[in-house]
Amino acid sequence: MKNFDIAFAEIIGIEGGLSDNKNDRGGLTKFGISQKAFPLLDIRNLTLDQAKKIYFDNYWKTPNLNLEKFELKNAIELFDIAVNSGVGTSARILQRALNLMNRDQKNFKNLEADGNAGDVTMKAYAKVNPDILFKVLNGLQFLRFVNIVEHDESQEEFFNGWMTRV
């Protein structure tokens, strides 16, 4: 739980408070929790404690990406990607990163980037250098943001803010 508290403090510092930008695909958002992702939630009256529980249950310790199994630096990076892009996307980026780091296929067979970071993904994770993985995760996150902006001009206004995540 200590790592989650550290990660939560960092992500909340990036996410901020209430936002209702017409170009934000998530719609009304508070503490990074969007109306689109949680349509039944009263976003305007969401408390920080409620947001923290949502983050833990929906982005930190999930069946397809349990971030408690990672060392802190990569856990925070994957958590950030999950909050910004979804848990499945975060797991797929992890799997793609692991595959890139294993192009010689000496450590493990290439993973299917299916968005489920289960036992096979975790075994592969145990065989790579976590410092290099951190850089690869950042690179893939950057490419995701570039791709979004290049395909949708309305998202350009968010690019510089997204760069604080990379």
Image: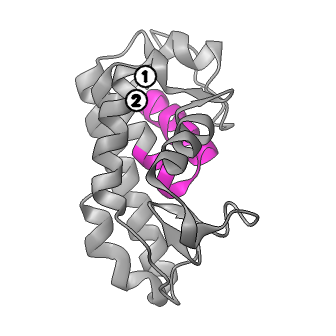
- Looking at this view, is 151 or 87 the one in front? 87
User: Which range of residues does the magenta coloring cover?
Assistant: 80-100
Q: Position of residue 76 (x, y in %)?
A: 35, 36
Which amino acid is tagged 1? Answer: Asn
Which amino acid is tagged 2? Answer: Phe
Looking at this view, name the residue that lies furthest to the right: 40
Is 90 one of the magenta-colored residues? yes
Image: 58 above or below 22: above
Task: Kindly state the secondary structure of the residue where label 2 is placed.
Answer: helix
Q: Quadrant of residue 70?
A: top left
Q: Position of residue 82 (x, y in %)?
A: 51, 46
Which residue is drawn at the image coordinates 69% and 62% (left, top)?
A: 41
Q: Residues within 10 Å of mark 2 (few under 14, many from 20)?
A: many
Q: Which residue is mark 2?
A: 4
Q: Which residue is mark 1?
A: 102
Q: CB atoms at circles 2 and 1 under 8 Å apart? A: no
- Magenta highlight: main SS: helix
Task: Kindly state the secondary structure of the residue where label 1 is placed.
Answer: loop
